[in-house]
Image: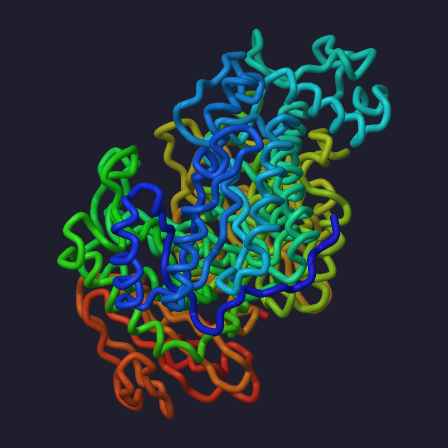
Amino acid sequence: MTTTSPRSIRLDALAYGGDYNPDQWPESVWAEDARLMVEAGVNLVTLPVFSWPLLEPRPGEYDFAGLDRVIDLLWEHGIRIDLATATATPPAWLVREHPEVLPWNADGVRLEFGSRQSYCPSSPIFREAALRLTRTLAERYGAHPALALWHVSNEYGDHVSRCWCPESARHFRRWLQNRYQTIDGLNAAWGTSCWGQHYLDFEQIEPPRTATGPINPAELVDFERFSSDALLELFQAEIDVLREVTPDIAVTTNFMSMFRELDYWDFADAEDLVTDDAYPDPSDQDAHIAAALNYGLMRSLKDGRPWLLLEQAPSAVSWREVNVPKAPGQMRVGSMQALAHGSDGVLFFQWRQAKFGPEKFHSAMLGHRGERSRTFQETKALGAELKTLAPITGTRVRASVALVADWDSWWGVSEPESLPSVRLDWLREARAWHAAAYALGQPVDVARAAGPYGEHRVLLVPNLYATTTEQAAALTAFVEAGGQLVVGPFSGVVDHREQIHDGGAPGPLRDLLGVEVDEWWPLADGQIRSVAFDTSFATPGETHGVRVWSEWIEVAPRTEVLATYADGDLAGRPAVTRRASGAGAAWYLSAGLDSDGMRAVLAQVFAAADVPVAASIDTDLEVVTRTDGTTDYTFVLNHGRADRSAPPIPGGRDLLTGAPSDSAIALPAFGVAVIAHPAPADPAPARTIESELLQPTRRERP
């Protein structure tokens, strides 16, 4: 697939607004909506995401009169449109005339119409109907001056990410034949000599439906790849139509943060602008930490280019078991966090709170009480503030640390059977590693396993279960050029055929890491183990707990042992190692360390990379800098409910208040400051303003 050229959203300010569903309201309400949108500072709305049945009430019969009027009304008020292709859910007439459009689950049961996204991604009937609607919309509205962005479908994979129907089976077989060319090639890749699964023809293969026992893991991972690609094909098909009719209009689809079901690297390659739907849980006091990783992925999918927060909740959502609202100020600081991490705007789901349907209890910018609602008052105030932050538009986040996200590895360690332990969860490990870097004061980008790695000094690899020689070569080059690489357990285990590397783990990473894994020793539920750090590496006698996983490893010459297992059957054996290579070093963590242990290791890694760390651990205080190379915009965010104070930033001023930042920055609960100040001539981390808020790490060993 060819990466698209960098078209951008047609908007000359930070985007502000949300989803609008005018077809849920009488037309008499629309004028009031437009007036209040202007009052709230809205300049972009998304519509008509779920309006296919009204736009095409019968096959080939279109009615755009209502959509015409609402677009014209919004444009009269200076509001631009993120125009959805409305293909997220087929209308009832389509699925009743063609029930084969509906998806099947793994048990072979057809899922009924009555929710949303009720389609099989492989269905040619659905695709034909969706593309017909997309083309009609593009031809009708492509030249409308209100059109700022194309929004294809909605949240691909949210409700239906996998389908096991006969049409999906046919598509899966075509995908396999394209991948392996011959049935002998597939048999070799899948290792079908195990358990008598040898195939004579591609027609004998079915999707991995519910079976008598464990299913071939190679087939399972290929089905994950195929399913992601099937939705990507659907996405690309709509993009191709839009490119043909409206070649100058940027295209997006809304992602769902760190989402297992779709390989977002591939999806981002297909579109112009990355957009995300983010719903941190207000009841989770650490939700902002996970959100920072999500946003690190979003900005990294397009090599650091700005992205767009397309959906968030003004307050409570409607789909958790307990839907806690956001406290006063919490929505504001969460919105500012997205801006700090590279979003060029803030949008919500949705504008006006619904009266009916599954989302009638989901908050909106304009709540059930209208202008008197708290959400309207808070979102109106935020809209005014965003105008003062216009200078950050187009700037990029400065980060020295990146974390590798690899969907093949994620899928491989997610299969429920035949692994040493199902407790090793890829996303949980990624979040734990990121949380340690976050606690040390460093924003974290996300990178592909094979690069590019940009100017990052530290590369975190929580797990790279499936590792290729190309990835290993890229990681080796990163280290030899001076980078600090940290690799977590159960990495380098299999190739991309799900076959164990010759000689065992860590496979092609063996020479780089200087270790060999003899056996995996996952921890039983309730089992407690610990590691002890070498006295030259950490505080004498310092020990840290082990979570979930441990390994019996053998260490090659020139590989330093930094920590050993302190108890259990592995007592005295190496747990954490480091091996110098070229100008850098590769670190291996054979154990799942607890949070204190992860911070202890990363503090030393950052020291080796000359990356500063926080003077003290306060995960409620976050500092992130966006820059245009001339001016830095440093966001100082208080995610907590207690007042905080940050050190001064000489020569700067707060864009939100206009106050100089030459004295200590006072932050009330959920407080925010956005300090504009001159960018340093040398943007190395130790010389940026963060060094006033962080402190250099000490290097214990050369």
Q: What residue is drawn where x is 58% and y is 15%?
A: 209
Image-based side of 619 in relation to 212, left or right = left
Viewer-closest of 445 and 435? 445
Viewer-closest of 288 and 692? 288
Viewer-closest of 178 and 652? 178
Residue 418: x and y, percent? 58, 21
Residue 183: x and y, percent? 83, 20
Image-based side of 687 in relation to 594, left or right = right
Give the quadrant of residue 72: bottom left
Q: How is the image coloured?
A: rainbow
Compared with 361, 242 (above or below) is below
Q: How many marks?
A: 0
Image-based side of 2 in relation to 373, left or right = right
Viewer-closest of 453 and 529? 453
Residue 683: x and y, percent? 55, 81
Q: What residue is drawn where x is 50% and y is 12%?
A: 109
Viewport quadrant of the C terminus: bottom right
Q: What residue is drawn where x is 79% and y is 12%?
A: 199
Residue 308: x and y, percent? 47, 60
Compared with 652, 270 (above or below) is above
Q: What residue is drawn where x is 53% and y is 45%?
A: 85
